[in-house]
Image (cartoon, helix red, strand yellow):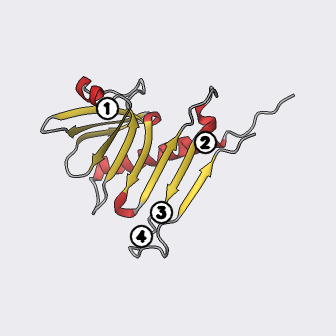
Amino acid sequence: MARAGIDYGGMMHRAMQGLIANVLRKVSDEGLPGEHHFFITFDTRDPGVQMADWLRARYPEEMTIVIQHWFDNLIVDDKGFTITLNFGNSPEPLRIPFDALRTFVDPSVEFGLRFETQDDDDEDEDEDAEYELDAEDDGDDTPPPGGGEVVRLDRWRK
């Protein structure tokens, strides 16, 4: 009789999505503090992504957005977020589910998360999820000696 294991990969995936949701909620309520800004890469093929047809044609697989100087209508819920961004003087609304995220980076504090799924025959993509957490902001503006610390959390194979 097989026992159900602890799904660390799925739990970490949901925790990292929750962290991003909390950050975006704070920005929605209070705006971007100081020099903070975000580069968010997402899979445009995800069925929950909503974007203009011309943007989808230009970015058929993956797109990186920048949340910095101008953005509007940032609304965050448990499944994802909506935001209006300016593309060549054309404001365009986007709906991005958290499940579509590939990277979240705040270069102002050298913080980044990466969500990767391996392309293989495994039906449960979360089984092969890899999470990378780059140097955390401890409130000290002094760069860490030897550069940023990288902590890699990989899903262990059975």
* Tag 4 and tag 1, C-beta contact below 8 Å: no
Q: Relative to residue 53, is residue 156 drawn left or right? A: right
Which residue bears the numbered disc 3? 136
Residue 40, above or below 139 = above
Label 3 Cα crowd, 10 Å radius (few <14 / some 14-19 / many 20+):
some
Reading the chain from its start, which is encountered first: label 1 or label 3? 1
Give the image location of residue 64, x and y in percent: 33, 42
* Tag 3 and tag 2, C-beta contact below 8 Å: no
Residue 59, which numbered label? Answer: 1
Amino acid type at circle 3 is Glu
Amino acid type at circle 2 is Met
Q: Relative to residue 44, is residue 127 drawn left or right? A: right
Label 4 Cα crowd, 10 Å radius (few <14 / some 14-19 / many 20+):
few
Q: Look at the image and tell me in which quarter the C terminus lies.
A: top right
Q: For the residues marked 2 and 1, what is the alpha-carbon distance in whole angstroms?
A: 30 Å
Give the image location of residue 124, x and y in percent: 62, 29
**Which dot, 3 or 2, sits closer to the camera?**
3
* Tag 4 and tag 3, C-beta contact below 8 Å: no
Give the image location of residue 99, x and y in percent: 47, 34
Q: For the residues marked 3 and 2, what is the alpha-carbon distance in whole angstroms?
A: 20 Å
Question: The residue tagged with tag 3: helix, strand or loop?
Answer: loop
Q: Going 12% across and 39% down the picture, which residue do you hit?
A: 89
Which residue bears the numbered disc 2? 11
Count every numbered label the image shows and give the total: 4
Amino acid type at circle 4 is Gly
Amino acid type at circle 1 is Tyr
Which residue bears the numbered disc 4? 139
